[in-house]
Image: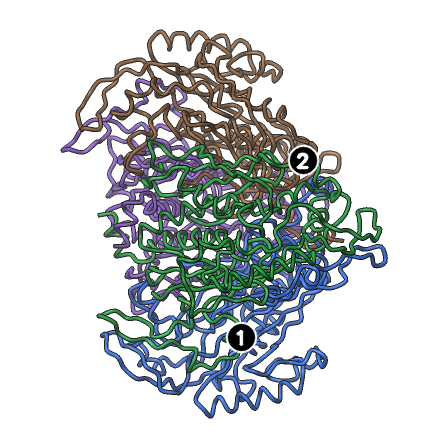
Chain colours: A blue, B green, C brown, D purple
């Protein structure tokens, strides 16, 4: 049960390794009638493309997507959409050495324990390239949601000690800097910090934040399939994520009820909340406010500094990982976070159509 | 799709409302041959029982479990185990008033939006009593895991500003104080803090931590069903949880690769890690180190202070919630967190049996 | 993975053994707003009640259902509906002998091989009483479908060599005879045949047929979740069913394309079929014609004749099964077949709401 | 929810249309360590290849499979195996006419009703080519099962009125004739019958039978996931199948208990059955005897005779379908039936590993 399928109605199945023939995804359960072409997908994939700044690997990865099924005459047909990105720039010999030992912070050891051996080339299935399928599927989910007025703003909130200043928040700035930060000053400081990391053969962690607007109230299912629980799983399933929080998140632990509760009030005849400490969910269902969540990414584990580890013969050795590695994961992961959120929200939105008998009867009239 | 089922092999389905006839769970996929009696379950249920300290609701809830199926001659048969706890002390008139308005911080509004109306008595399905089914199932999962050497230590890490001092960590202390803190001094301070909260008609948040030892390496499935992703979902699905983190969690955002990576070394012929920043998972699989995660709980939303809200007629009103409410959720949620973790780990452990062909062939020989 | 959960959106989980405390079902994903009371369920359960004719076991089983959750003020709330039927008339000593040997035609041997032991009282989980949960859930599904104009006529088509004469088909007759046959003459003949079976300490098989009208076209999902495939699973999962066919069924094997194809024509502006060899599905989707399927039930395996078998010590022995057993399974299974069909159709109908983007967008407007 | 995923542990997701770029499957949950190459898959695919006799379409379809992921150094890695067959010989203009009307016996009308439009080229997703993904996955499942001593013999049992004579059954003959019949005389007669069908611009139906040997007892889960129920779904999901039966199948309806029950006896210290009316399952679990089931296939709906139908403008018209169509579906479907059976049996076999606690504890020692 290698767990490569996610979702209940809008269901995605990804496949592929870093240095295999390619990577891809099958999107099953996409509603029929969506205008869709490869450019829609490519736009999302380009946001995770390396080689766009000095802080991303200089590997040239074209990552051109091809749609193989499920679209006819420019529209989705309701049948599975299979998409592929061919691996074109992989050099397996770069990685031959790591076959023999376990890189700290990587999944090498666990793969060997679980499966008996592993495709060690570029990390195999646990490579960051695994996210290609997620992003291709996310592009479709996001396109559907946009037609329903649901939109995403996702960005780098912090890199190492450098956080954005919410007072200077400028969403237009996100695409302007290669770190995807909505604050040009913070981006400049983070850039300096990362230069220092590279110089020190080290790497940095950071936080990604996502804000979703336009959600109707009531999405998500009480108990286990809460909207925040499913988001939590979707986001925690991204490699290198070590924490997930919604709304005030871990800060609620030191808050008090009177401050943390969001008062309801009326706004033009609608029930709204005065504040949004909840981050847009109550009881696991969307509450009509913007949904706000964050993910913490660990520093890139592949670093050029000398590290201690063991090899497969059980010898303690020293290694130093060279090659083309980003010193920070967050910027390229921004679109992955957005994609996983879009997939989860769409799945909840479809599931929610069956919650009331009167609406079902109306639907079939 | 109201999402009351969790798990793939060890699968639980919970049901019940705060003031209905009872609450329960069906555990399907429990292996045959486990010695099981009601006392095994009761022991876990008693850990979430109210009325044990001045900081838990004085409601008397006996919460006596009855096993209805799946156990014969003292052993599980492999068929579904149905368990029920009858509601015996519920007074619906306590809650009649809240039918008309939306309590801040509660799911009332979302239930109405999603389903058109709600069982308002005691919060209905979104009551804390919903966790009874989780805990009953968790008791079974934990009993199985214990026989395989996998054990849990779960406790209150912080209440409001009061955190335990890891240097004074004493697991024996956990059951000694009604706050389930492994540090008697912290417990005393937290107790004072909570008294102040009550006096101020307010409530507190906190953090629960869980440490799991004895896990073999390799549990969890790469990509979407990572062990940490499934744990994230299981824990985020508990009411009032707003954040989940594993290992160093959100602190990784400001760490550097060389510090965050855990070096591998040899210990008596075994591969082990020198540190455990990862919290026991790499690439979504258990790495052989203790699994360590935390959950952030928001302050109890039901408080006696005056709050602004709206009623179902769309009028802005002031309310003050009286009744029997804990000023802090964490202590009684400790066993819920442990239960959800046990259910998730057991499900991963069962799934992992099918990962290697050689082991499957051996199994059927 | 003992497989006691069925359905994707309208999801049922059954539990219970013949001689345990009771049997029940949790229905999760039932839409909110359905008027529902115990009498709705009881009406269905009464159709499977024994003791209604000389051909059903004289065991007195009251089988009174109790709804434990998910209904508030007479309407479903959208949360799980837990229902229970207590076992009140079980005498375990009736069955003590069968603990030691394997009854031919029963699951005893397989249970021991799979689980290491079994609850032998009355067949435990593999008793016909297991269907109580299915029928209780089916009553809900059928009530919802009826409000959408979808209705079921289910009946005994044949018992041993006695088949109904379709020219004499009278649906009003079904409830008039204890064999649930829509043809009084056939019922009389079948009655004689069964009397002979009892006299000979033997039992009979038969066929159940179900006709579903009012289905919109398009229900069912191409490829694996075809409407007929899901019906096939649901019906084959009923104990004693050895065959399932839809429309002309096995007769298609000796038909020819020109005869078997149903020509389309226009009827008052609607596309309809002139014939219904397909039985109401094309390509796995409902085609707007009545859905017609049949299930073949084997003869009751518990018979008073002497049979050869082995005991748990590996000795060959002769046995003769006494006790209160029906000589024919079909009549009491009619409502079980209808229930499984209703559950499957409702699940398909809910899933089908997400098939087109334009309808989804309309729904959320 | 277009239902293109099947299985719980060994999970397959298929995609692709008759005249799209290609068709494929992602196999997730395949155990690691299986030797696998494209030739293993090709051998199965070649069994469904057209153009092998005068009764299969003269279309030249190379159907060469390519493995894109999940195999490294000749062995499966435990990660998803993505396989693709490119469409190379499709001429869309062959089919342009059928865009405007609904072919009798085809899914055209249902697709339009469900999705609003359809990929009409060669039937799109409802083409027989959809089975390519099933067969590619089945080849893997069958290879694993063979290593465990579980083998399949699958063949054409009847074509129209011509049935094989079980006394002349010769499994070696199956691959010798293009009809996959294990009886050369029957094959000759069926061949004549089919020639007559073609001459008459008509088509024939038939029955496929599958015998599985080497199954351990206990596979399959009581209640909904019975082995026969899951097989029933898997087989009924194949296009053109209208009936499924196991063991004596529909004949049990006219059998009696004493004849239908299979007596147990001892054979070299093992419990075995003297007969196999059950077809290898009792209570939904394998009983150690060969598993025997049959599927009824309707006649090919595409025929050259004149048929009545309607077009999308609601006009009644006459059509005659020309093109390259087999007059019989069964022979090429034999390998599809075997594949679906292998996938289902393997999934049950993996699930069964978790049925007993003592075995689980042993496994992890």
Q: In the image, is residue B62 above or below residue D10?
A: above
Quadrant position of residue A27: bottom right
Q: Which percent across, then down, holds residue B154?
A: 45, 57
Tag count in the figure?
Answer: 2
Between D86 and A311, the one nearer to me in the picture = A311
Q: Which percent across, then down, holds residue A329?
A: 51, 78
Report if the CB atoms under discs 1 and 2 are less than 8 Å apart.
no
State which chain disc 2 sits on: C
- The dot on residue C72 is 2
Residue at the spot of label 1? A64
Residues tagged by mark 1 and mark 2 found on one chain of the structure: no
Is residue A362 toward the left or the right of residue D37 in the image?
right
Q: Which percent across, then down, holds residue B107?
A: 67, 51
Q: Secondary structure at mark 1?
A: loop
Q: Which percent across, then down, holds residue C145?
A: 64, 33
Between C197 and D68, the one nearer to me in the picture = C197
Q: In the image, is residue A189 above or below residue C292?
A: below
Look at the image and tell me whether residue D105 can be seen.
Answer: no
Between tags 1 and 2, which lies in front? 2
Residue at x-position 61% and y-position 56%: A227
Between D216 and A236, the one nearer to me in the picture = A236
| Quadrant of image for the C terminus of chain A | top right
């Amino acid at each position: 049960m290698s767990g490569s399928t996610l979702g209940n109605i809008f269901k995605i199945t990804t496949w592929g390794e870093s240095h295999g023939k390619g990577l891809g995804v099958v999107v099953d359960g996409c509603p029929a009638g969506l205008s869709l072409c490869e450019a829609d997908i490519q736009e999302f994939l380009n946001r995770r493309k390396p080689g766009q700044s000095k802080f991303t690997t200089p590997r040239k990865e074209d990552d051109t997507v091809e749609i193989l099924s499920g679209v006819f005459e420019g529209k989705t047909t309701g049948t599975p959409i299979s998409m592929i990105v061919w691996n074109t720039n992989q050099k397996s010999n770069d990685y031959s050495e790591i076959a023999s030992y376990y890189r700290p912070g990587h999944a090498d050891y666990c793969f060997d324990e679980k499966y008996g051996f592993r495709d060690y080339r570029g990390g195999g299935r646990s490579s960051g390239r695994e996210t290609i399928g997620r992003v291709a599927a996310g592009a479709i989910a996001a396109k559907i949601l946009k037609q329903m007025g649901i939109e995403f703003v996702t960005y780098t909130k912090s890199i190492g000690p450098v956080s954005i200043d919410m007072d200077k928040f400028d969403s237009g700035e996100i695409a302007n800097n290669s770190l995807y930060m909505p604050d040009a000053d913070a981006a400049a400081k983070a850039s300096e910090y990362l230069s220092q990391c590279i110089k020190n053969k080290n790497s940095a962690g950071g936080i990604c934040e996502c804000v979703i607007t336009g959600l109707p109230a009531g999405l998500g299912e009480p108990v286990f399939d809460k909207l925040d629980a499913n988001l939590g799983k979707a986001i925690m399933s991204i490699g290198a994520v070590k924490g997930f929080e919604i709304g005030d998140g871990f800060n609620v632990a030191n808050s008090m009820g009177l401050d943390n509760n969001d008062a309801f009030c009326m706004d033009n005849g609608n029930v709204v909340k005065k504040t949004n400490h909840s981050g847009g969910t109550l009881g696991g269902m969307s509450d009509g406010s913007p949904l706000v969540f964050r993910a913490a990414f660990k520093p890139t584990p592949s670093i050029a500094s000398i590290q201690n580890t063991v090899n497969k013969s059980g010898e303690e050795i020293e290694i130093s990982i060279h090659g083309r590695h980003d010193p920070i994961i967050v910027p390229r992961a921004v679109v992955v976070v957005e994609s996983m959120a879009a997939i989860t929200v769409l799945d909840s939105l479809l599931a929610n159509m069956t919650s009331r008998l009167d609406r079902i009867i109306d639907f079939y009239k």
